[in-house]
Image (spheres, rainbow, N blue to C red):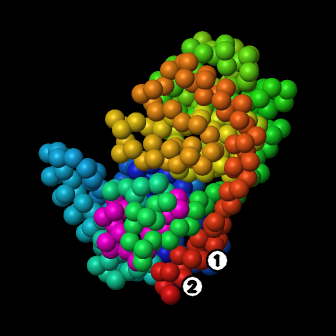
Amino acid sequence: MAKIAFTGGGTVGHVSVNLSLIPTAIEQGHQAFYIGSKQGIEREMIESQLPNITYHTISSGKLRRYLSFENIKDVFKVLKGILDARKVLKKERPDALFSKGGFVSVPVVIAAKSLKIPTIIHESDLTPGLANKISLKFAKKIYTTFEDTVKYLPKDKADFVGATVRQDLLHGDKGRGYQLTEFTDKKPVLLVMGGSLGSKKLNDIIRQNLDLLLEKYQVIHLTGKGLLDSSLNDVKGYKQFEFVKDDLTDLLAITHTVISRAGSNAIYEFLTLNIPMLLIPLGLDQSRGDQIDNAKNFEAKGYGRMIAEDQLTEHRLIDELQDIEAHRSTIIDAMHDYKESYTKEDLFNKFITDALG
């Protein structure tokens, strides 16, 4: 049996695949440990959801595509991160490293290469992020979620594996979903998700048009932390949460249509569940544009519609929702053609073969 190091962090998407693969590794008799930053979201997620997995911290600097004085300081943080990671890897002596990307992963991948530890990296978005572009030079292979991503990468290193979706997603409890929301099955449910940090602009437009939306839907609104509006607590057919974790599968089980950001993990979950989606990706002022690429790709495949955040108005929102409902059966037919490429077991077994074979 092998000992596997896992890394990746900075966002939920840079951790979620690891949360699927680590239990799979343990179930098959392998050992696993995690390397992440001291204060990143990856630490919170791994320590809360996989408390028996050893978590090692390293120094981590942010990688920027633009000139900044902070880049100079972060070079030293990355160099220290490489030394920190080498120390951990020499102590733990893993057989292979699986990297999900994000800034914290780069020092770990470089350290692994210096110790001749084979590395496989995973890219969730349509276009590779800067961290994975750097890491690719030191890795054996890169796995991609989107088939079109392969054309941006060296042919001998890139393998399309598709999305690995949590199996519990398919077993949401409708009864529990209706109980949590106090909704009925007599009217469609619209789920609004603004991402882990929420979206003030999206929240405002939903609330301004709530009366109009409630004519057609019952609305579940995941607002983001600290963004609840207590004045709307008693509105019939409207239920708001800051965020949900364990109950999300039950809420998705009663969802007919979703308005969401366009992170790859989330949108592949909606696709797997055949939920038509209106995607409002993070703009270039808040990201490198990866969600815009993801949303355009899904719209082109017929899985829903997208609105750029700078074009989001109440009229556009309502128009696009009406268009989704008018073409609902066509959208769902397109979704039925999608097949999951790899289960988490298939993906882990491929990783072991590619890394150690």
**Which residue is under mark 2?**
1
Work out how far the residue at label 2 is from the one at label 1, CA to CA, in angstroms. Answer: 8 Å
Residue 56 in which image quadrant: bottom left
**Which residue is under mark 1?**
28
In the image, 147 versus 52, the foreground residue is: 147
In the image, 230 versus 299, the foreground residue is: 299
Does the magenta-highlighted stretch encompass residue 146? yes
Q: Secondary structure at mark 2?
A: loop
Q: Secondary structure at mark 1?
A: loop
Residue at the image point whose x is 39% and y is 67% from the top: 153
**Which three-letter amino acid code belongs to the residue tagged 2?**
Met
Image quadrant where one finds the N terminus:
bottom right
User: Is any part of residue 5 visible from this angle?
Assistant: no
Residue at the image point whose x is 76% and y is 40% from the top: 329
User: Is any part of residue 138 visible from this angle?
Assistant: yes
The magenta region covers 131-147
Residue 79 in which image quadrant: bottom left
Q: Residues within 10 Å of mark 1 (few under 14, many from 20)?
A: few
**Which three-letter amino acid code belongs to the residue tagged 1?**
Gln
Residue at the image point whose x is 63% and y is 45% from the top: 302
Please tell me how many numbered marks the rendered image carries: 2
Residue 234 in which image quadrant: top right
- Compared to residue 189, the image places residue 165 above or below, namely below
In the image, 86 versus 320, the foreground residue is: 320
- Tag 1 or tag 2, which sits nearer the N-term? 2
- Compared to residue 354, the image places residue 198 above or below, namely above
Q: In the drawing, does residue 188 fall left or right of residue 96?
A: right
Q: Position of residue 317 (x, y in %)?
A: 57, 24
Q: Position of residue 219 (x, y in %)?
A: 68, 25
Q: Residues within 10 Å of mark 2 (few under 14, many from 20)?
A: few
Q: In the drawing, does residue 234 fall left or right of residue 4?
A: right
